[in-house]
Structure formats: C-alpha cells, structure tokens
Amino acid sequence: MKARTLFAAGLLLMGAVTAHAQSVSIEKPSCIPTEDNGLVRATAAASAGQTVRLYFRWKEHEDFYWVTMEAEPGGRFWATPPKPEKRNEQVEMYAAIVKPDDKEPNGKIVARSAPEVVKVTHDCAPQLGVKERGVAENLTVGETSPKQEGKRVMAFLCDGVVTRVNFEGVRRADGVCRACVIAWWLRKPIAVAPALLGTGIIVTDEPEPSQSRP
C-alpha cells in the first residue's frame, strides 16, 4: 500500500514538472502601431526541438496566423507581427510552444499562454532595433486554415511578408503580396536617361497605341 502511494505521488510530481517545463506566458505590449511593426515578447520553458510561436489575428475575425518567435537567453522570446492596416484597431494574440508531430504537419501545440487583445494606435512607438527591423522586413507567416491560402493576411499589410507556410506545412513565397508589388512597379512611370534617347522623356507603363492609318 505504501509503495503504491509513493508511486502515485511520483507520477503526480512528474506531471507537475512536465506541466512547468511546458509553460509559456506573453508580455502584453501596451500598443501596436498602425501600419508599422510592433514588438511582442514572451517567456517560455521549451524543450529541445520545440519552437515558440506568436499566434495573431484581427480581433474576432476568422482564423489565426502565426510567426516564429526569436529566442534569447534565459527562456526569453520576441516576435514582430505584420503591420496592421488602418481598419485594424485591435490585434488578438497568444504565444504557444509547438513540437514536431507526424500527424500534424504544422506541429502540435503543447502549451499556450492566455490570449491578449492589444490596441492598434497611430501614436504607438515601440523600440525596434536593427535585428528586429531585419526580421520584420523578412517575415514568414504561417496559416492555420486552408481558406487562408492564396490570400493576403487579413487586415495586415503586405509590407515585409515574404514567405508563407500553409495549413499542411508547405513553405512557399508569398505570391499574393509579391504580385501586388510587381503590379505597383508596372504602374510606376519610368524615367529614361536623356543620354539614351537624346532628350528627357518619361515613359509610362503602357505606351500609347499607334493610331490607325486610313
């Protein structure tokens, strides 16, 4: 009887240690800037091979997206979500520890923080250093639903979104945002050097069609 009691106590202790080992908490930022990158920090006790993600979305609008959080010493992590559009006034978010799983291509969440809602304001001014800006300009955004594939990140700007990971864990270039950038460049007037044409001429994206002859 005593041995069984000790064994049960041991299991409870192991469970408590495991639960503690998989804990994660988010540090709610005071705000996120409109049309600019915010900075979100978290503390997590993740095991080897696990990653920490920041899940985010326009508050109460469809499914979450995620970005991988960058690791720092002491179990500290940070991430820069994409830039919110003007219509996006609140971002809902939580942090999660994710481990590889054969049955779930995008990994399995083993621990998650409490959700937080952060206001998006015009006067918010988070301090992003060179490292944070570098990450913000080369974001990989993950999806949690098949219907997110082939669409822009809802209520967030394309600026900085370079790569996407779909619901099945397939990584690809963000063709939607890239197409918008290409279309923008095609619409821009192009200045042609005078040395090439003899005079200074501005050539538009669509040359004027030649007039029909009688």
Image (cartoon, rainbow, N blue to C red):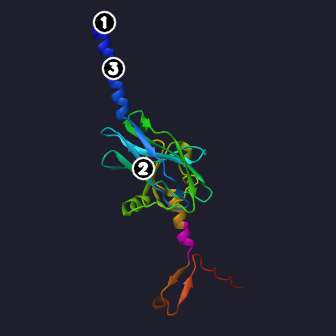
Q: Position of residue 151 (x, y in %)?
A: 56, 52
Q: Position of residue 41 (x, y in %)?
A: 42, 50
Q: Position of residue 18 (x, y in %)?
A: 35, 29
Question: In terms of secondary structure, where does tag 3 sit?
Answer: helix
Query: Which residue lies under the disc numbered 2?
Result: 41
| Rendered image quadrant of residue 63 | top right
Left or right of 90 in this view: 131: left
Query: Which residue lies under the disc numbered 1?
Result: 1
Q: Nearer the viewer, residue 75 or 161?
A: 75
Q: Residue at x 59, y 76 (%)?
A: 206
Is 186 colored magenta in this rendering?
yes
Which residues are drawn in magenta? Answer: 183-188
Q: Residues within 10 Å of mark 3 (few under 14, many from 20)?
A: few
Q: Residue at x 51, y 45 (%)?
A: 93
Question: In terms of secondary structure, where does tag 2 sit?
Answer: strand
Q: Residue at x 33, y 17 (%)?
A: 9
Amino acid residing under circle 2? Arg
The quarter of the rendered structure image containing the C terminus is bottom right
Q: Residue at x 30, y 6 (%)?
A: 1
The residues tagged by marks 2 and 1 sit, at their Cα atoms, a distance apart of 48 Å
Circle 3 or circle 1, nearest the eye: 1
